Amino acid sequence: MKVKGGYFWKALFVDLSAGQAFGLPFDEEFAKKYIGGRGFNIKFLWDNLRRHKFKINPFGPENVICMSPGPLGGTYTVAAGKTSFATISPATGIYGDSSMGGVFGPEFRQTGHDALILSGRAPELSYLLIDGAKVRIVPFPELKGKSALEAEGMIRQQTGDQDLKIAVIGPAGENRVVFACVNSDWSRNAGRVGIGAVLGSKNLKAIAVRGACDLPVAEVGQLMEITNAGFARLKSHKLFSFWQEQGLMSVVDYVNGIGVMPTYNFKDAHFDRADQINGFVMEERYKIGDTACFCCPMSCGNACLVKEGKYSGAVCEGPEYETACMFGSNLGIDNFAFIVRANQLCDELGIDTISTANLIGVMIEAVTSDLVPVEEVDGLALEWGDEEGVITLMHKIANREGVGDTLAGGSKAVIARWPRLKPIISQVKGLEQSAYDARTAVSMALAYATSDIGAHHTRAWTLAHEMEQGLNWSPEKKVDLVMYHQTVRPLFDMLGVCRLPWIELGFPEDYYEQAYQAVTGVKYSLQDLLAKSALLYDLTRLIGVKLGISRQDDQPPDRTFDQPVLSGPQKGKVVRREDFEELLELYYRKRGWDQNGIPPQEREREFSEPLVSE
């Protein structure tokens, strides 16, 4: 099957040390095997690791950051505004990725490139300007220490172009906070695994793009027909209007209602004041408008403004569920105005809301439980609900000041300094857990444990399925559920589309098969595409194994086994270790991995074709 559209047939490789940029061509077989987006990024990382004999310092010039929007990105496809970033994560030391919505990815595609690979380190603080085929590394030391929004404004002023699309880091990225993020379009972030920290280590403050190319689409009429039908289907869904009104904030009441909402640093899973930080409070008191990503009718972004009180003037796009929960219930805070301010500050400083609030929760519990003396946290007498203490710690983290220097190193650094805190830190492989408790569903514990980037729900969110339908499912069926999620959800990141229409409004999976066929002309079925995604899960596992991951790392957070839920509908629940180990054994067998979680040798050979650059 010949590829007739979807690709410009080159990645842009930028050597920041040498100050050089060139197109890196790839062929049709490469495109059909790796698809794009996450798939391209994984292959580029794998080749770079092979080139360096799997000896990579995440902050060294030899590490690369890869970015690719995928073949559907920027086309007239439902929710085609996603772009995927990947690197060797400074938080975990293994493969890490994070995706960003908005319009940055589609604009990058219009420069005539399918991917970006950043290597080396610029001699001084700079930004990368990609203006179609023209690529410049622009020194701009005056950007040092500027917030993400300030830096974006300064770049627009210097270039005289208000229409540039810019991905930028804040001071946390410059200071190599291992959960620093990349910000674009005001509040669209590639938030997890420390992409921003690796950009900072490369002396790169921002990537600014301006494109004008038409995207290659094989069957334009067919794409328009199926996408128009897709829009109509979404808009006819009974929850469409409610979703536009609240977006992901609608999840607060549901998650708290079923008893999986992290509370007081994951000690509990039910917050008795959740009705003070839910979507209705946001909608009635703080929301001032909707925002949307490229080609998406869902408009799930909420622009929020605090109009009175201590945080008057605080504004952000969001918060979304994860932020509301992690800076709310997880810290014992029921003030939505504070959550808006915390969200805004994370955007300005360039830090991930999940990891930041997770680690602050750890320190509050450590101090209130006398596990760490006040003197070791810079004299901060931290308490639950301590809004000022939280904001103080956020600044300390971003600037690596005092105890913030330890927290900026992530879970691994905290455990290295205070080993006694490991039982109260919710993390897997060094990545802090996102805002869904796993003690009530063993499939979710397995999902966190076997995620290729660490404890993040975007790989597999199985809670609702197991709790609503599958508590009595066989172990095999629960493993199948996890593996299916770990296959279909990453596929969205390969194609360059958002998964929320599928998750929240039941958008059919076969639409993406049809869209891929219309854009590329390749008649892959959904099962063909899923097979490509499953194969790449083996490749990210191989990367992890080469960098030191084994069975002992495939464990959920300690609390999953050892500390029962304290209150709410799941009171007393905990995952039995033997149940988890049974699922893990079965998971390895179904993956074709050995008892230590290592894929077969033929997999490595399958991915060891000549390096892309050769």
Image (spheres, grey):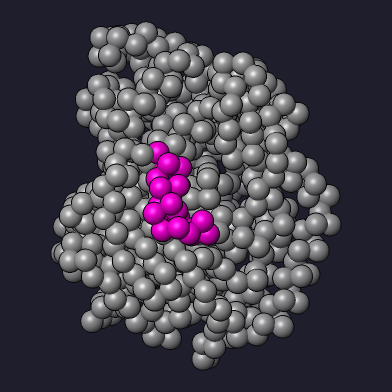
Seen in the picture, residue 201 relative to 177 is either above or below; the reply is below
* Residue farthest toward the bottom in the current orientation of the protein: 2
Q: Residue at x 61, y 55 (%)?
A: 293
Q: Is residue 166 magenta?
A: yes
Write the start and end of the magenta stretch as one range.
147-167
The percent coordinates of residue 267 (x first, y second) are 48, 21
Residue for point 36% across, 39% down: 146
Viewport quadrant of the C terminus: bottom left
Which residue is at a point 42% across and 82% down the rendered structure image? 9
Answer with left or right where residue 215 lies relative to residue 38: right
Residue visible at 40% across and 38% down in the picture:
147
Observer able to see residue 94: no
Q: Looking at the image, which is closer to me, 562 or 315?
A: 315
Q: Is residue 540 above or below residue 424?
A: below
Which of 412 and 150 lies nearest the eye of the viewer? 150
| Residue 357 sits in quarter | top left
62 vs 194, left or right, is left
User: Residue 4: horizontal and vertical position, in percent?
Assistant: 54, 88
| Residue 455 lies in the magenta stretch | no
* Residue 208, quarter of the rendered image: bottom left
Q: Nearer the viewer, residue 131 or 554?
A: 131
Give the x, y percent position of residue 469. Answer: 69, 44
Percent position of residue 125, x then y: 25, 50
